[in-house]
């Protein structure tokens, strides 16, 4: 029964958000809240020889000035379990990146905190810094593992196959550091209740992750830490880890004995909450004369900090995307004097598909094969890495539907052959892919005597539509109209759910909600069939169907509402609970989403300016739970692809290590005029293996390959192969 699932319902939180009534965590109203402000370093490496806070402490309104000299000691700030990051929370005098917290000023107002912050006088002992990932300046480090399995893989005999190849591509691609720029910067409100309990309102993708980290740092019982995050103004991975400022807010509130509100400035977003690391990727593709792959090699280097280890797994998709018996991949790190990188939308695949899909385009020209035809010649029917079958794979349909909508067959194959007046026109395409994971999630569904239902699960809505889709899933399982279902998420008081990251929320939390709703439904049915006064009395539970809030016996002759069943039984509610675990047969399959990206660009031959004029993306991501929020996710990924392809780059001053693109005037993200009409095609796909609702997740795949399609279109227009993102005009004019 699927009345609500799949429908393009508006976001249930949409009106609240656009009318300013949605309480975002950092703006939560709490009585008597003080303001905390992070004072950060202006040097990138060395130590704090001293920090003079006397003047700051005397400034108006100041409640406390915390530094490493007086800050409470926390436990485990220098560890990184569970994917947490090493923190800089005033525990010592070490300086490990620019804009690192060196003091926290707490005052009665933000203005007073800002004034006092200017009066904090650090004295630095500087060390020479290196923030440039040049080959000669750093030695590669082999990490222990990546978030996607081993650092290295080696199937077949790459060297022999490469030697035998008739056509070869051997090229190096580079992608810059990029920073997450959600509309809402991070922020935290910390409220202690006595000495051993704290409530934390935090803009986070994972309330339980924050709870665990705060409990560890402050030596509290997890159940004594409550984390609330009801509405989040975008996440993209930066809000997936509890960063230093969260702990500093809790610490500041503890010290001053008042609630504390701490928000990051946009500038601090460029250093305190991670970034996508720069990569250098060496691709070698060897093929038969007509493009059938014989040898694939992808060696990735990515930047990380000196004190922590984050690996950008950019070769992941190269292990599984194309059929080839000889595939070798590796990941290495280069340590720099920078903050630690972190997950950023499609971590790994975002930068990795740029390299792989650019190289495939290069191979298409080298073998004189149409780029789409080249992908079809190398279509993987099983996963080349594990040998497993795909749980579902509708990539052929994506290629076909996308190409048809785009009009790919009308493409002139020669470079520079398509023009519009003085503008050069280029058409490019690329494959999109992202793994479909599933994590354990718990949910409770309460079926109320008034005929409504409440869904409870400690998940998050980072703007993706979680509130909306969970209501749809519960509505169908209960046989209730969706407007009678209310969804509660974003609170550690609710059943535990995973981080909203890795495109896993729909695939992990919906099965839990479905299971809980089915349990609640079963409980209501059990009441009805056991009750002599019910028209359904004596029927077998399996004979009862539910729809429109009605329980119906066979033939439709006997029926009554949930409300009638519960009120006669004098119950306020019946409750269903479910703990959804990874489906056991998942390990027999390779489980990935797929898509095909098609871009049309124009290039101004005199100015080198690239405009994306048209974009079509076709995706198969399992069951689509809401075609409107899903389409929005996929489009958002493509918009980000325009940013990666043409605009985004975090620039550091090589002498000081300081980020110079620290705001949205200098760090360019696509604005409306950069974004052309984007057409999204969603291929309906049934997948019985992925999880009990069949959803694979749509959060990240839209980004993958989109930048490569644009870069490939630029080549088609100009004959210029830009292997270094972003494709700024200077690179085309040189
Ligand atoms: Mo996403 S980068 O896993 O929040």
Image: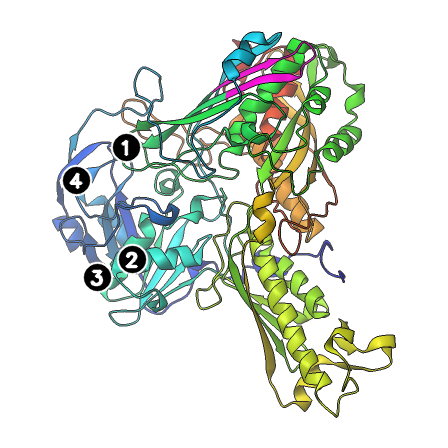
> Of the residues tagged 1 and 3, which is closer to the observer?
1
Q: Residue at x 47, y 62 (%)?
A: 496
Question: CB atoms at circles 2 and 4 under 8 Å apart?
Answer: no
- Which residue is tagged 2? 216
- Which residue is tagged 4? 122
Q: What secondary structure is found at the residue carrying circle 4?
A: strand
Q: Residue at x 70, y 87 (%)?
A: 530
Say whether disc 1 or disc 2 marks the residue closer to the N-terminus. 2
- Region of the chain picked out in magenta, as a range: 282-297
Percent position of residue 258, x then y? 27, 66
Check residue 713 for magenta coloring: no
Question: CB atoms at circles 4 and 3 under 8 Å apart?
Answer: no
Residue farthest toward the bottom in the current orientation of the protein: 533
Gap between marks 1 and 4 measured at Cα:
22 Å
Percent position of residue 325, x then y? 59, 22
Percent position of residue 656, x then y? 27, 26
Check residue 284 for magenta coloring: yes
- Which residue is tagged 3? 255
Q: What secondary structure is found at the residue carrying circle 2?
A: helix
Vertically, is 123 above or below 446?
A: above
Gap between marks 1 and 2 measured at Cα:
23 Å
The residue lying toward the viewer, choosing from 432 and 290, is 290
Say whether disc 2 or disc 4 marks the residue closer to the N-terminus. 4
- Which residue is tagged 1? 306
């Amino acid at each position: 029964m699927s009345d609500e699932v799949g429908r393009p319902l508006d976001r249930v939180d949409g009106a609240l958000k656009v009318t300013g009534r949605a309480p975002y965590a950092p703006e939560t109203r709490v009585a008597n809240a003080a303001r905390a402000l992070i004072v950060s370093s202006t040097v990138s490496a060395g130590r704090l020889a001293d920090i003079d806070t006397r003047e700051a402490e005397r400034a108006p309104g100041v409640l406390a000035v915390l530094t490493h000299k007086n800050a409470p000691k926390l436990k485990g700030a220098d560890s990184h379990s569970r994917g947490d990051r090493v923190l800089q929370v005033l525990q010592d005098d070490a300086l490990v990146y620019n804009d690192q917290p060196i003091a926290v000023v707490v005052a009665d107002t933000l203005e007073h905190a800002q004034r006092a912050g200017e009066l904090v006088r650090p004295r630095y002992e500087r060390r020479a810094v290196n923030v440039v990932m040049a080959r000669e300046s750093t030695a590669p480090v082999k990490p222990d593992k990546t978030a996607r399995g081993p650092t290295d893989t080696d199937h077949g005999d790459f060297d022999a196959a490469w030697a035998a190849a008739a056509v070869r591509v051997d090229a190096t691609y580079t992608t810059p550091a990029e920073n997450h720029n959600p509309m809402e910067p991070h922020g935290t409100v910390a409220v202690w209740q006595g000495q051993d309990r704290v409530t934390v309102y935090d803009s986070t993708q994972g309330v339980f992750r924050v709870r665990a980290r705060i409990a560890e740092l402050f030596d509290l019982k997890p159940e004594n830490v409550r984390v609330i995050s009801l509405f989040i103004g975008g996440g993209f991975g930066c809000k997936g880890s509890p960063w230093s400022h969260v702990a500093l807010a809790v610490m500041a509130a503890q010290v001053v004995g008042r609630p504390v509100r701490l928000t990051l400035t946009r500038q601090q977003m460029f250093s305190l909450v991670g970034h996508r690391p720069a990569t250098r990727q060496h691709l070698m593709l060897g093929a038969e004369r007509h493009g059938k792959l014989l040898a694939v090699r992808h060696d990735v280097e990515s930047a990380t900090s000196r004190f922590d280890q984050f690996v950008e797994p950019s070769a992941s998709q190269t292990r599984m995307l194309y059929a080839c018996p000889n595939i070798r991949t590796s990941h290495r790190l280069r340590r720099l004097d920078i903050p630690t990188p972190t997950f950023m939308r499609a971590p790994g695949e975002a930068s990795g598909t740029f390299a792989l899909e650019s190289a495939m385009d290069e191979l298409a020209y080298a073998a004189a094969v149409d780029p789409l035809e080249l992908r079809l010649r190398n279509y993987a029917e099983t996963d080349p890495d594990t040998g497993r079958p795909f749980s579902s794979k509708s990539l052929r349909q994506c290629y076909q539907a996308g190409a048809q909508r785009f009009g790919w067959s009308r493409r002139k194959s020669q470079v520079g052959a398509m023009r519009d007046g003085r503008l050069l026109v280029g058409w490019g395409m690329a494959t999109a892919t992202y793994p479909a994971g599933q994590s354990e999630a718990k949910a409770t569904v309460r079926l109320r005597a008034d005929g409504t239902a409440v869904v409870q699960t400690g998940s998050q809505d980072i703007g993706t539509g979680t509130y909306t889709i969970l209501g749809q899933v519960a509505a169908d399982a209960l046989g209730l109209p969706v407007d009678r279902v209310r969804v509660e998420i974003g609170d550690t008081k609710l059943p535990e759910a995973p981080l909203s990251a890795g495109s896993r929320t729909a695939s992990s939390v919906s099965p839990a909600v479905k299971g809980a709703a089915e349990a609640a439904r079963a409980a209501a049915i059990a009441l009805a069939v056991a009750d002599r006064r019910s028209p359904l009395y004596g029927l077998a539970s399996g004979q009862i169907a539910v729809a429109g809030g009605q329980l119906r016996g066979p033939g439709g002759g006997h029926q009554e509402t949930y409300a009638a069943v519960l009120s006669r039984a004098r119950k306020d509610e019946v409750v269903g609970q479910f703990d959804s675990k990874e489906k056991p047969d998942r390990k027999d399959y390779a489980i990935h989403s797929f898509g095909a990206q098609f871009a049309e660009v124009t290039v101004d031959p005199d100015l080198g300016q690239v405009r994306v004029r048209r974009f079509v993306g076709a995706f198969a991501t399992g069951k689509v739970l809401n075609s409107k929020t899903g389409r929005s996710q996929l489009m958002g990924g493509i918009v980000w692809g325009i940013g990666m392809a043409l605009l985004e780059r975090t620039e550091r001053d090589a002498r000081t290590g300081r980020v110079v693109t620290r705001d949205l005037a200098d760090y360019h993200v696509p604005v409306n005029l950069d974004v052309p009409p984007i057409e999204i095609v969603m291929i309906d796909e049934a997948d019985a293996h992925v999880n009990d609702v069949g959803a694979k997740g749509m959060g990240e795949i839209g980004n993958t390959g989109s930048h490569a399609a644009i870069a490939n279109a630029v080549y088609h227009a100009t004959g210029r192969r830009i292997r270094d993102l972003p494709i700024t005009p200077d690179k085309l004019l040189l």
